[in-house]
Amino acid sequence: MTADLVTVTARAAVLLGVAGARRGEIGMPIGVCRTVGLVATAILVVVTGSGGGPGALWAAAVAMPKWATFDAAHHLVSFTVIAAQGGVNGTLNFNGYANGQLTVTVPVGWQVHVDFVNSGAGALPHSFEVIRNVKPIPPQGIPPAIPRAETDDLVDGIDPNPPNNKGSADFTATSAGRYLWFCGVPTHGLSGMWDNFVVSAAASLPSVTVKK
Amino acid sequence: MGAGDDPKTWLMYGHDYTNDRYSGLDQINTSNVGSLSPKWIFQTRVIASFENTPVVYNGVMYVTTAYNHLFALNARKGSLIWQYDHKLGTTIFCCGPVNRGVAVAYGNVYMATLDAQLVALDAATGKVKWAKQIADPTLGYSETMAPIVYKNIVIVGMSGAEYGIRGFVTAFDAQSGAVVWRWYTIPATGWEGKWSTTTPEGEDLHRDIAAEKAAWNQYSDAWKRGGGSMWQSPAIDPARNLIYMGIGNPSPDLDGGIRPGDNLYTESIVAVHAGSGTLAWYYQEVPHDVWDLDQTSPPLLFNVTVNGQTVPALGIAGKTAWFYILNRNTGQLIKRSEEFNRHQNYFSQPTAAGVRMLPGANGGAEWSPSSYSPQTQMAYVAGLEQPMTYAVHSVPYKAGTLWLGSAFTAIPGEKQYGTFTAIDVNTGKVAWQKKVDQPMMGGSMATAGGLVFTGEGNGLFDAFDAKTGEIIWQFQAGAGVNAAPMAFELDGQEYIAVAAGGNFQLHYPYGDAVIVFGLPKR
């Protein structure tokens, strides 16, 4: 399913290259069959190119999450990653996703900016880093697989009190491969606070996949 | 080894079996504490949440840190004698990689570990004599408390009720490590209790008993994942051969809809017969808790005067922000103190949108042990004011996964602070209270010198006049002082020791120091 997504995304990128000079919310298709209805619509629009021009295409593609934006012209992508967004997985989640439910793909060579927020739900500290897709999941934070792809206080985490404390990370997705978004606070990763992060040589634009 | 009543030593986590954290030493007192200064500092190089109270026996200080490192130090000068670094297996824990201390007896040092083992080491060499796996850590079982040795047994509870465990307390043979008895904090039958609509003191819990009873058949096996941690060391009354302990929250913490009933013996103070591990009595502070108001602060024993009669009592500070005083023969309430933190919107049922309540999920009193001075007949309670929003939605149990049943969240912009409160145990009234800038977590110690010591998250280590609450000495330790202090005597000199290493739950600055204070040489 992920391979299909990459294919669709790459084809979509050709079309979106027209509109992609605009800066704004990522309007890219979310692939995977088992996702929300709007996504299927977006993919259909992109693949068939029957959206009535770039403006319509952009409008049809807003199924992309609001927490992701990109600038295709400058190869920049930004994510707002909220730790403990609601009670999913006992609050051990990124943007409400855990245990690899989420797959975020960025093209190789792009600059990635992450605004990281600890919502405070569950009153636990959290952190963010990109690690290799390793098994077993590490018990706590390890050196990031991509330089600077980590928030401060990786193991101690960002204080949940007061809620919405922030951190950030800026890095370049230099090497293609499969990685994880990972919380470095001890045992959080073991408990499922990880999602997939793909640096793709095939992708032309970022995309987000949700596995139900 | 004696029972810990020698004032020169500090033989167990709470000083002795009363758990009262009262040192009979008086060389350091209200008249000279102003000249107290560090005598030595030991840095463990484990920079993480530091909740240990050291134990001193026979001139050796035993210190544990986060991740189960154990240090034996020369108590005179702080030099390392030996070090044990536990090789942790799989560990899943909610509230920091902490350890609170050891027990020392029979030539052994006993430490319970995050990966749910009980390890016995040779006290002289630090070599492992035996290690026993208590429970499966991949399911969320873990150990943070200091074991207690009583007669021939080592008593250890379990943490992990945030993961749907079924809690229990185990007595191990102190020599061999064989299991002598096990008492489940969650009974296989009867955990529905009395379907109480109020607390024992009469506050409305706003339960929908009809709905709970209607759900009973569907969730009749919820006790198998019922929670019931024992976070802290018990008190023991040798005259009655009873072990007293505080039991924590049910699982999942906030979602009561899938665990109908009172959820015995969660949120309870219980007494268990030391010889058999059978229940003597219980007192449930919050039946069917849905606010994570677990009884985490440990019990302490003292006597109170009731109608002119001396009554053997047990005191315990709740997350509920009340100090409970029970008859330790019967478990009946003698008195509940005045509130030591404010109550607002208390016992409102969580909703999907969230409901505000004060105290929040950290209390009141968190795991911080209280102390008691027979001189003042006051208990000293570290507390905190931290309003929280409680939201709930139902999620199914998944082994080894944090299972809160949604979330409690501090409220942006609402003032938080700490309280340090002296409670007259005969009247239940607040004798004095000091407010500090940050929520308090760590605990206290009282001494015969008329002093009570406690620490703050900002690194201050404080000494108060135990009678009046006047602060008469402070030391800036450079990291959060979030551990309960202790006192001991060597070569005729009294010393005060405290761990300064910050706190995971409240994110106070980390460090790695054990600081030992004394008076200038006379």
Image (cartoon, rainbow, N blue to C red):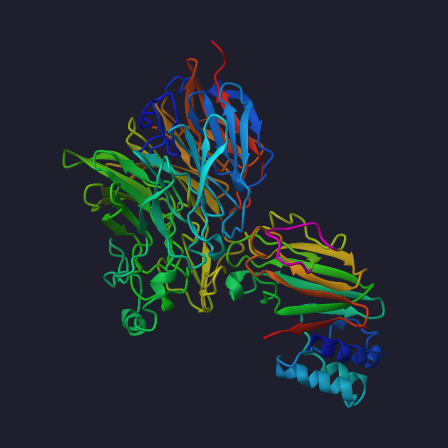
Residue B108 quadrant: top left
Q: Name above or below for residue A211 compared with residue B123.
A: below
Residue farthest to the top, as pictured: B522
Q: Name above or below for residue A107 compared with residue B121.
A: below
Characterize the magenta stretch by its predominant secondary structure.
loop
Q: Is residue A159 visible to us here?
A: yes
Magenta-colored span? A133-145
Please state the horizontal and vertical placement of residue A26, each as a whole percent of the image: 73, 73
Q: Nearer the viewer, residue B510 or B81?
A: B81
Q: Is residue A138 magenta?
A: yes
Q: Residue at x 59, y 54 (%)?
A: A126
On the rendered structure, is A103 left or right of A22? left
Please state the horizontal and vertical placement of residue B437, each as a whole percent of the image: 50, 41
The number of numbered badges drawn on the structure is 0
On the rendered structure, is A47 left or right of B109? right
Q: Name above or below for residue A15 compared with residue B319.
A: below
Q: Quadrant of the N terminus of chain A?
A: bottom right
Q: Is residue B308 magenta?
A: no
On the rendered structure, is B351 left or right of A63? left
Q: Name above or below for residue A8 compared with residue A82.
A: below
Q: Quadrant of the C terminus of chain A?
A: bottom right
Q: Is residue B432 visible to us here?
A: no
Q: Residue at x 54, y 22 (%)?
A: B78
Q: Nearer the viewer, residue A73 or B63?
A: B63
Please state the horizontal and vertical placement of residue B425, each as a whole percent of the image: 27, 37
Please state the horizontal and vertical placement of residue B305, each as a whole percent of the image: 19, 34
Residue B232 quadrant: top left
